[in-house]
Image: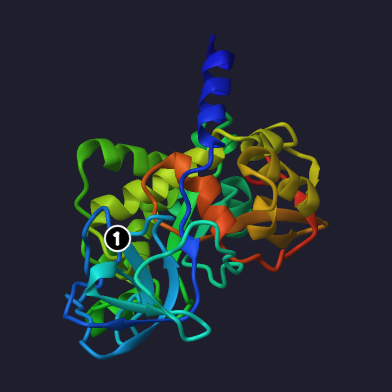
């Protein structure tokens, strides 16, 4: 029965969600309208408005029958924002005016990555960071013995960090004084889930990740960590986690990992994955996967579409060992 339920969940997870429709050209605002970071959540970090008469680089529409355009607002953080189509007009690459996306037209390949999801293989992380509090309590029954753990969800580009953060908090974050940062208030259930999936909360990693990256996500702390855990769940219930769990103590290649992503989330998904490794004596161990994503995160079943819309990643190291739990 448990295996049947897992197969049903995997089927749901690999079903593609609706993706954005890539566009080129510009959007010229005719009125002052909210520039949203999330349409569904109606978030607008910085309370940014479009300026009538200003032209903005156009990235995408939210659907074939669009209600919103995705544009670049240079002074906003993050710069990628959604604006209602009735707030202006679109000029295509050839200069023709349009008020919406026409179904059936050929759209160019998407050009950017909006987020990077970083997930650890915790036993390997602890081999090179054995002094961390979370590394002293690992057992073969621990969650991290057979699952990926959460490092963070990072809005892009790389310098999109520390949004509206005080100088003191930025300094504490950058210098490893994470316990000096404000505590993260979360609902009881989410706190319990985060403490399991992010063992680094014992070192106040959650405070650091929110301060450095989450403040640029454009939502509450609750939504930022809930979205991060949804993405982690999708991977931990996929062929990718099965590959690692089945090869503990053995070598796994980047090609195998990318193939597992393709199997779980659709062809080409693996090209959005990079792998980090570290030397540990005479071994090379896999410490982290970083995964490029673009789009709106609403739940675990969005991962296929998020991967498909992002730019390919560099790859990183070519192979490494899946480290067993416990220090050598």
The foreground one among 130 and 89 is 89
Colour scheme of the picture: rainbow
Going 21% across and 38% down the picture, which residue do you hit?
A: 188
**How far across and down, in percent of the image, does residue 100 sit?**
37, 66
**How far across and down, in percent of the image, does residue 171 sit?**
32, 81
- Examine the rendering and report whether any part of residue 199 can be seen: yes
- Examine the rendering and report whether any part of residue 161 can be seen: no
**Side (left or right) of 257 relative to 177:** right
Q: Dot 1, how many residues are within 10 Å of its Cα: few (below 14), some (14-19), or many (20+)?
A: many
Residue at the top extreme?
Answer: 1
Residue 95 lies, with reference to residue 262, above or below; the image says: below
Count of marks overlaid on the render: 1
**Side (left or right) of 149 relative to 245:** left
The foreground one among 147 and 142 is 147
Q: Which residue is mark 1?
A: 38
Say which element carries label 1. loop
- The part of the image, by quadrant, that contains residue 54 is bottom left
Going 43% across and 52% down the picture, which residue do you hit?
A: 200
**How far across and down, in percent of the image, does residue 58 sit?**
42, 77
- The part of the image, by quadrant, that contains residue 49 is bottom left
The foreground one among 302 and 281 is 302
Residue 252 lies, with reference to residue 283, above or below; the image says: above
**How far across and down, in percent of the image, does residue 159 sit?**
44, 81
Going 48% across and 60% down the picture, which residue do you hit?
A: 21
Residue 51 lies, with reference to residue 236, above or below; the image says: below
- Quarter placement of the N terminus: top right
**Side (left or right) of 35 relative to 254:** left
């Amino acid at each position: 029965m448990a295996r049947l339920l897992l197969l049903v969940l995997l089927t749901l997870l690999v079903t593609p969600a609706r993706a954005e429709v890539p566009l080129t050209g510009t959007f010229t605002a005719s009125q002052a309208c909210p520039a949203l970071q999330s349409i569904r959540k109606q978030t607008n970090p910085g309370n940014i408005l479009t300026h009538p008469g200003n032209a903005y680089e156009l990235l995408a529409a939210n659907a074939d029958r669009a209600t919103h355009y995705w544009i670049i607002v240079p002074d906003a953080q993050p710069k990628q924002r959604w604006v209602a189509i009735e707030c202006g007009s679109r000029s295509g690459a050839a200069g023709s005016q349009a008020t919406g996306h026409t179904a059936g037209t050929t759209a160019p390949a998407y050009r950017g990555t909006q987020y990077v999801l970083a997930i650890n293989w915790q036993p390997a992380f602890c081999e090179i960071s054995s002094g961390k509090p979370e590394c002293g309590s690992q057992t073969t029954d621990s969650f991290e013995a057979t699952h990926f753990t959460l490092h963070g969800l990072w809005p892009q580009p790389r310098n999109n960090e520390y949004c509206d953060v005080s100088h003191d908090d930025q300094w504490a974050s950058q210098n490893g004084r994470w316990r000096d940062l404000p505590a993260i208030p979360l609902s009881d259930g989410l706190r319990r889930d985060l403490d399991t999936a992010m063992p680094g909360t014992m070192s106040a990693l959650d405070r650091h990740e929110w301060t450095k990256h989450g403040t640029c996500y454009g939502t509450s702390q609750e939504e930022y960590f809930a979205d991060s855990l949804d993405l982690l769940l999708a991977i931990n219930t996929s062929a990718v986690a099965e590959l690692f769990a089945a090869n503990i103590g053995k070598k796994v290649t980047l090609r195998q990992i990318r193939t597992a992503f393709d199997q779980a989330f659709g062809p080409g998904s693996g090209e959005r994955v990079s792998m980090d490794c570290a030397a540990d004596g005479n071994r090379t161990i896999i410490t982290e996967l970083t995964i490029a994503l673009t789009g709106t995160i609403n739940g675990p079943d969005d991962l296929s579409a998020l991967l498909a819309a992002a730019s390919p990643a560099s790859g990183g190291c070519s192979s490494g060992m899946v480290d067993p739990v416990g220090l050598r």
